[in-house]
């Protein structure tokens, strides 16, 4: 009886120790993500993946991390939280990934949190800035990008300093939009800058013409656009077809590449919060590294802000994996990151501790110039 009890305890400890570690072998580290690869946000998310793979390919070509090469599998969830849960379960249980990396969406990230706890699997660098996901330190959730609260504060503070009094907020009625609406309400109340209108569209059937009419009726000096993907330029294009001429402000999740492609010269003057350093500033080590690897891959390749964000997420993950050493497990990775303190790539820094897994708080505002580039 005692022997059976001891055997059961040994078995339990073994399965607990290795519950989230099946994706690490002598030669491989398996990563996976449920991402929005189709629909309005698809092109932007694909760019995140291209940036991450640019670094992973370079790391693998140099021999990997302590002899292990990185593989990265992505599955489309079409921005549906239920599909995100299904995909994440498949990645963990069937494909045996070691870690989830760069998954997209606020509602999607919230939906998979129970799976992380159940399987003892880390999600590193989700594409969300929601404050609700940054309260406390979830042992299996590590952020890279600054939170939406920091971006919102930066935007509203600048509007207040410029003397802008009529500000509207436009959003898509989904998890991201509602999260940003909550942030903008808090920031506008703190700065005593009440919104003149809150305008939304249905993500399943967006009526941009009606949203544009509502915007023109509110007559704002500035509109803060709480959305990403094709929704941003589609709304801006509809507003510019009316008599309204507000200055558009956007969040970092808005893709510069998509905005330029859709709006062309009308993109000039749009102001976007940025949570990554300027791609023009090659004195910053991580910018120089990205530019060098991109040029080596293709001399015709054009730098992309979304691609660069995926690259930085991957760069920080690789740094954590390297610091963890050869004895890589979920537990050892978490210990390493929680003891890392500040990790700096020039001006871009991220901080981790047992009390906070929030990563970076880097936020700047940049304006799109006549050439379609961001000026910080």
Image: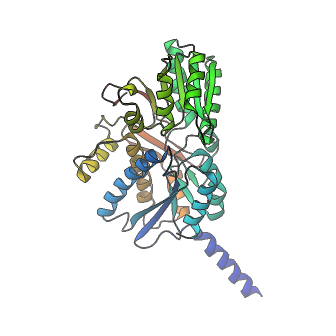
Quadrant (top left/top right/bottom left/bottom right) for the N terminus:
bottom right
Vertical placement of 139 versus 6: above or below? Answer: above
One can see residue 8 in this view: yes
Q: Is residue 207 left or right of residue 370?
A: right
Left-right relation of 148 to 263? right
Specify the farthest residue to the right. Answer: 1
Residue 209, position in %: x, y? 55, 28
Q: Position of residue 163 (x, y in %)?
A: 52, 11
Task: Please give the count of numbered marks on the rendered protein.
Answer: 0
Rendered residue at 36%/39% (across/down): 346
Q: Is residue 225 left or right of residue 183?
A: left
In this rendering, is residue 336 above or below 243? below
Image location of residue 200, percent across then percent down: 62, 31
Q: Residue furthest left?
A: 299
Which residue sits at x=67%, y=75%? 12
Q: Is residue 356 visible?
A: no
Q: Nearer the viewer, residue 226 or 319?
A: 226
Nearer the observer, 274 or 233: 233
Residue 288, image x and y in percent? 29, 43
Left or right of 29 on screen, residue 7: right
**Which quadrant of the structure image shows residue 187?**
top right
Q: Nearer the viewer, residue 138 or 178?
A: 178
Specify how the rendered protein is coloured: rainbow
Check the image and report above or below for 7 versus 309. below
Q: What residue is drawn where x is 50% and y is 49%?
A: 125
Which quadrant would the C terminus be assigned to in this image?
top left
In this rendering, the answer to whether 198 lies above or below 301 is: above
Identify which residue, 279 or 27, lies in the foreground.
Answer: 279
């Amino acid at each position: 009886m005692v022997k059976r009890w001891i055997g059961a305890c040994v078995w339990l400890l073994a399965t607990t120790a290795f519950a989230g570690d099946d994706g690490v072998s002598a030669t491989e580290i398996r990563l996976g993500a449920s991402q929005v690869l189709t629909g309005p946000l698809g092109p932007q998310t694909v760019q995140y993946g291209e940036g991450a793979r640019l670094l992973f390919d370079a790391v693998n070509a140099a021999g990997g991390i302590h002899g292990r090469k990185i593989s990265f599998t992505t599955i489309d969830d079409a921005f549906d939280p239920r599909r995100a849960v299904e995909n994440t379960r498949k990645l963990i249980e069937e494909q045996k990934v070691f870690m989830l990396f760069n998954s997209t969406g606020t509602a999607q990230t919230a939906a998979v949190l129970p799976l992380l706890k159940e399987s003892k699997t880390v999600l590193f660098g989700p594409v969300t800035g929601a404050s609700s996901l940054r309260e406390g330190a979830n042992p299996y959730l590590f952020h890279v990008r600054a939170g939406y609260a920091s971006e919102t504060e930066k935007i509203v503070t600048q509007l207040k300093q410029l003397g802008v009094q009529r500000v509207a907020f436009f959003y898509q009625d989904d998890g991201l939009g509602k999260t940003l609406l909550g942030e903008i309400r808090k920031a506008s109340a703190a700065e005593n800058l009440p919104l003149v209108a809150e305008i939304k569209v249905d993500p399943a059937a967006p009526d941009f013409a009606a949203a544009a009419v509502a915007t023109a009726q509110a007559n704002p000096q500035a509109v803060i656009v709480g959305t990403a993907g094709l929704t941003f330029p589609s709304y801006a294009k509809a507003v510019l077809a009316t008599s309204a001429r507000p200055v558009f402000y956007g969040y970092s999740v808005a893709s510069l590449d998509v905005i330029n492609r859709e709006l062309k010269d009308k993109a000039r003057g749009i102001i976007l919060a940025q949570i990554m350093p300027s791609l023009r500033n090659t004195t910053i080590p991580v910018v120089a590294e990205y530019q060098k690897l991109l040029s080596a891959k293709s001399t015709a390749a054009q730098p992309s802000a979304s691609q660069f964000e995926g690259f930085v997420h991957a760069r920080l993950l690789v740094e954590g994996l390297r610091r963890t050493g050869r004895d890589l497990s979920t537990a050892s990775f978490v210990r390493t990151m929680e003891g890392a303190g500040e990790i700096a790539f020039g001006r871009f820094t991220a901080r981790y501790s047992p009390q906070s897994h929030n990563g970076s708080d880097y936020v700047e505002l940049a304006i799109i110039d006549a050439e379609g580039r961001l000026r910080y």
